[in-house]
Amino acid sequence: MSVNLDVLKNLSLFFFASNADELFVAYLALAHDNPAPSVDDWSAVEFSFNHLFVGPRALLAPPYASIYLDGDEARLMGASSEKMRYLYEMLGLTSPWLNKIPDDHIALELDALWQMESAMLQVHSPQLRELHDYLLNHLQSWVPKFTARIHAVDDVHPAILYVSDRLNMVLLLQESATAENAA
């Protein structure tokens, strides 16, 4: 794998964050190996994060695959969410937020990818590789739409734009690594 596992883990932690302190920790870890905008006010990052991904108002960039993939049927806990729950079950994973956060939340999907990448360093399993490639293709089918929505919103904090760009970069690197492994 050409992507640092810590980057996947820290992207997942960033999108799982529930307050400014958790955003700070994940951001600092992401910026460890890649220059990032400095942040003076983490409450401003938290406000922007909540405005985009949490609410209480309508989400400007919902972090759920079903919104971007399920077409006219787009709704939370849609077909994409069900497919992800099934994938997690096949991997022996269960969301700690089962029935609280839809299974197709970006943080859960990144966490599953991180866990699969970690496992593939330990064991050679064609079945695990197949599930990994399925999840990677799934992420690549919706994350660019998700990050485009982030960039389309006015006044998004630069720290969140940085994380959004980092997420796209990771998926591009993963795509290249997968193509190299297939060749």
Image (cartoon, rainbow, N blue to C red):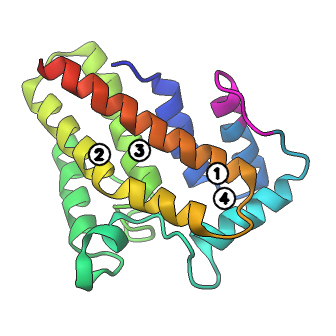
Residue type at numbered disc 3: Leu
**Label 3: how many residues lie within 10 Å, few (<14), some (14-19) or many (20+)?**
many
Identify the secondary structure beneath mark 3: helix
Query: Element at badge 4?
Result: loop
List the residue tagged with mark 3: 110
Quarter of the figure with residue 174: top left
Q: Position of residue 105 (x, y in %)?
A: 42, 60
At horizontal 66% and vertical 59% (from top left) the residue drawn is 18
Residue, x 32% and y 50% (percent of image)?
139
Of residues 123 and 80, the one drawn nearer to the viewer in this rendering: 80
Q: Are marks 1 and 4 in contact (CB under 8 Å)?
A: no
Quadrant placement of the N terminus? top left
Q: Which residues are magenta?
A: 28-37
Q: For the C terminus, which image quadrant?
A: top left
Q: CA distance from mark 4 to mark 3?
A: 17 Å
Residue 112 image-quadrant placement: top left
- Identity, as a three-letter code, of the amino acid under mark 2: Leu
Amino acid type of the residue that numbered disc 1 sits on in the rendered structure: Leu
Q: Is residue 141 above or below residue 81?
A: above
Q: Which residue is mark 2?
A: 93
Between disc 4 and disc 3, whose residue precedes? 4
Q: Earlier in the sequence, mark 1 or mark 4?
A: 4
Kindly report which numbered mark, 1 or 3, lies closer to the viewer in this rendering. Answer: 1
> Distance of mark 1 from mark 4, alpha carbons?
18 Å
Q: Position of residue 108 (x, y in %)?
A: 41, 51
Give me the residue at 27% from left, 42% from top. 136
Q: Give the Cα distance between marks 1 and 3.
A: 18 Å
- Does the magenta-highlighted stretch encompass residue 97? no
Residue at mark 2 to residue at mark 4: CA–CA distance: 22 Å
- Dot 1 and dot 2 residues touching (CB under 8 Å): no
